[in-house]
Amino acid sequence: MRRTVFNEDHEAFRVTMRDFIEAEVVPVYPGWEAQGHVPREFYRKLGELGVFGIEVPEEYGGAGEKSFKFQAVITEELARAGVSFGGSSVHTALCLPYLLQYGTEEQKRRWLPPFTAGEMMTAIAMTEPGTGSDLAGMQTTAKLSADGTHYVLNGAKTFITGGVQADRVLVCARTSPPDPGDRRAGITILVVDTKSEGYAVGRKLEKMGLLASDTGELSFTDVRVPVEDRLGEEGKAFSYLTHNLPRERLGIALYAYAQSAAAIRFADAYVRERTVFGKPVAAFQNTKFVLADCQAEVLAMQSMIDRALDADDADELTPADAAAVKLFVTERAAGVIDKCLQLHGGYGYMREYPISRMYTDTRVTRIYGGTSEVMRSIIAKSMGL
């Protein structure tokens, strides 16, 4: 089907990104996976290319675009090549919206120029060892000093993407005890300098997939955070997180869709070249039917994604809509990628083939950003159930 969600500017940007990825990422990507992170100097290249500043206002060194569609183009092109930009997706897709929406003018002028240049990498720390989707249950605390000049941060976070290399981390912490009548109250976001005394990076976590993305454990022992580094109002973080979740979940669904579309591309190329019993695997009816089913599912995913991108641009993407898109696309993506791997036979199990990486990389899309079970609860609630 002809897509109408992207315009000429998006397609011109797509060409630029495709050339850049082929030249700068594909040849070295196996090395990034082996070391478990993207080199810091590469983030500066992304800054020079303007990738981090697409949605940053011009007065802070960015391009001033408000549409998420340019990020969608990047996601699709990375999937097409079977690679990633490591943990930097969190930098732009998750952290930037908070800085733009809740940062003061002073904070924006201090943080956004180095953010855009790739000189200051960011991450966001919500999940804790004892809490996953239940953010209201977090135990990390931040107590305001007697003179009101700083917070004292204590606690731990885990599964923090980009956390190993980050220069600033948006840490969610309790600045007041939970209210039995409203467990969500009392959470605040502090933009913590990772060079602060008492801040520590624990284990660099070994994951099933997303091997080029650094993921770590963080701990805070009496970390002093200036009040000037509080993001937004004290105690209002849960509403901030809720407001930004639809965009986050759309980004996860977009990634799963892009991986699925790329999986078909890789499988199609493989079955045309691979011969069995004297003829290409593509010649067998089973192969044709499997790929046909996959293509139909990907077109359905694409339709949902494109409508959601338009809704996001119009600021009309509701939490229930985003949950439905994430649930449908991530669950269907798992099946498509599994079928495409099966068509590769034994080679599909080898990490040298992109389809193997896609299989493990995409699995987490049904977990982070809210599990599929949480998505079902959100959708059911929106139905009055």
Image (cartoon, rainbow, N blue to C red):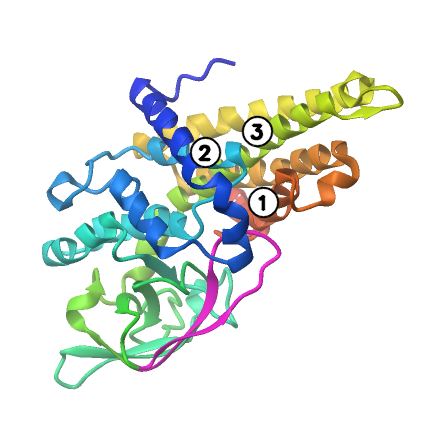
Q: Is residue 240 left or right of residue 293?
A: left
In the image: residue 80, left or right of residue 152: right
Numbered range of the magenta stretch:
198-222
User: 218 and 273: which one is in front?
Assistant: 273
The answer to if 175 sits in the magenta stretch is: no
Q: Could you say which is closer to the camera, residue 254 or residue 189?
A: 254
Quarter of the image for residue 343 reads top right
Q: Position of residue 206 (x, y in %)?
A: 57, 63
Q: SS of the residue at dot 1? A: helix
- Discs 3, 2 touching: Cβ within 8 Å: no
| Amino acid marked by disc 2 | Glu
Quadrant assignment for the C terminus: top right
Q: Which residue is mark 1?
A: 362
Compared with 216, 378 (above or below) is above
Q: Amino acid at mark 1?
A: Thr
- Please tell me whether mark 3 or mark 2 is closer to you in this view: 2
Q: Nearer the viewer, mark 2 or mark 1?
A: 2
| Real-space Cα separation, disc 3 to disc 2, in angstroms | 18 Å
Q: Residue 54 placed where, x, y %?
A: 26, 38
* Label disc, if present, on residue 258 of the rendered structure: none
> Residue at 65% of width from left, 40% of height from top?
353
Label 2, on which residue? 22
Q: Residue at x 23, y 49 (%)?
A: 117
Per the rendering, the mark at residue 261 is 3
Asked if 353 appears above or below 228 in the picture, the reply is above
* Label 1: few (<14), some (14–19) or many (≥20) C-alpha neighbours in 10 Å: many
Q: CA distance from mark 2 to mark 1?
A: 21 Å
Q: Residues within 10 Å of mark 2 (few under 14, many from 20)?
A: some
